[in-house]
Amino acid sequence: MNPALAAWGAYMRWTDRIPAIRAIVPFIPIVALWAIVAEMEVFPRVFFPGPAEVVRSFLTLTYKGILPAYLEDSLVRLVVGALAGMAVGIPLGILVGLSQTAHRVLWPVLLFFQAIGDIAWLPILLIWFGFGLTTMTFIIVYTVLFPVVLNTVLGVRSVPVDMHRAAQSLGASKARILWEVVLPGALPNIITGLRNGLGYGWRALIAAEMIVGTSGIGFMMFDARRAGSVVEIMLGMIVLGLLWYVVDAWILAPIERATGQRWGLVTP
Amino acid sequence: MSSLTIRDLAKTYFDPYRGVQVDAVRGVSLEVEQGDFICVVGPSGCGKSTILNMVAGFLPATSGEILVGGRAVKGPGPDRGVVFQSFALFPWKTVLENVAFGPKMRGVGRAEREAIAREYLALAGLAHAADRYPNELSGGMQQRVGVARALANKPEVLLMDEPFASVDAQTRMTLQEELTRIWQERRPTIVFITHDVGEAVFLANRVVVLSKGRVMADVAIDLPRPRRWDALVEDDAFKALSGQVLHLVRSA
């Protein structure tokens, strides 16, 4: 058999067994290129360290406990902010999606405040709440809230009127329809909103940590700039990317596979 | 005893785009006996779907009266099962959960409602599909689920709004034959809306022809049952009745 085809077949079989390979393989040339450029010393080594230095810095910072502690701080902030954003955003989205009056009153307001980006709130928040957790929490809740609200509204409104009617003529009360029809019907959109919200929220959090933080990955990177440690900045960037991949592949994607894709509401 | 009584039913609505009042239904009266099977036919815009939506309680009537099992209709309710052209199955529920939905809303316990659902799925020839999701089924199978779901709630009247209009012609004939079989076995009261004259004559005991919001004719269909397409296409009585109804609809 053609050896290229044989290799291709082996690759397909392996990735089928261990899907993570599919996500890792595209990075091999990127890391290789990075290593080559660093080894050739096109740029001074302190400005452009290679993968080996970053891995060493990862091990050192993990051993010292700095990286795990900062990572925990950032993640706790993200999770708390996301939960608060969902707790407000999903009910608000359902209200605006179901009630014509609420839609007329709130939709323009939502669009207005959505347009004021998270970071644009920082100046006034710093005056009101100072450099601290309140400011950071406000920013992340704010950032998560709008994608969740707007997508929930879309989801609620995408449930066909015949489905409401079917439930009504099978004897469902308003509360049962909310639980049995509106929520599951809106779920694929709610997950999309959550995906966007978490993505924006994560970025906003890192930015907020750089400016107002005393801990967290964003703070670590900005602090490294002060010390001139490019290695740590690069490490922070890689951690951000990896972490998002983990959240997406291990949490969001499985939920989507089990709901919208299973029901045929979303094409995989 | 009549399951459904409609008296002087009228529906007028305002069309904001044309700026005129539209009389969709103008004084319709109809009696449907318990266990009867009637079809309502008419050209598009004759008001047949509007009537069904008012009987189902989805639309308020402008004037007139609708009684189901002797009680006046105020909004949708489980005494009127509805089968939709769009199927309107819940995609996030399995076939079994869809059919068990009505009993669940009435507070029937899990074991009992699943037994009810399995009974009606078997009646619709879908016992094997209980654990699948609607999107995994063909259109014809989805509408069988729609019929089973409506029947499982044991409604006083089964309202069907062009239920077979969006399936292919072969499947439609099978579904029509199955519906007459199910009707003969269970004798639900059925009001079936369609624009297809052949379908109406094939299915019904009575065909009501609607024109411009009024009842134009009420034709008794005394064809023997069970009815099968391969026998009826050649049947003179069927052809005569179809011709008669078609003539009425085209002159409507």
Image (cartoon, coloured by chain):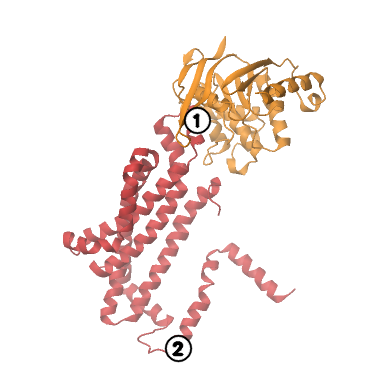
User: Residue B110 — which label?
Assistant: 1
Residue that extends furthest to the front in the rendered view of this protein:
B19
Disc 2 marks which amino acid? Glu
Mark 2 — residue?
A39
Q: Quadrant of the C terminus of chain B?
A: top right
**Chain B: colour as depicted:** orange
Question: Closer to the camera: disc 2 or disc 1?
Answer: 2
Secondary structure of the residue carrying tag 2 is helix
Identify the residue shown where x is 47% and y is 49%: A188
Position of residue A60 relative to residue B216, above or below, is below
Q: Is residue A197 left or right of residue B188?
A: left
In the rendered image, is residue B14 in sight?
yes
Q: Is residue B2 left or right of residue A57?
A: right
Secondary structure of the residue carrying tag 1 is helix
**Chain A: colour as depicted:** red
Where residue B1 sits, quadrant-wise, is: top right
Position of residue A91 relative to residue B147, above or below, is below
How many C-alpha atoms fall within 10 Å of the one at disc 2: few (<14), some, or many (≥20)?
some
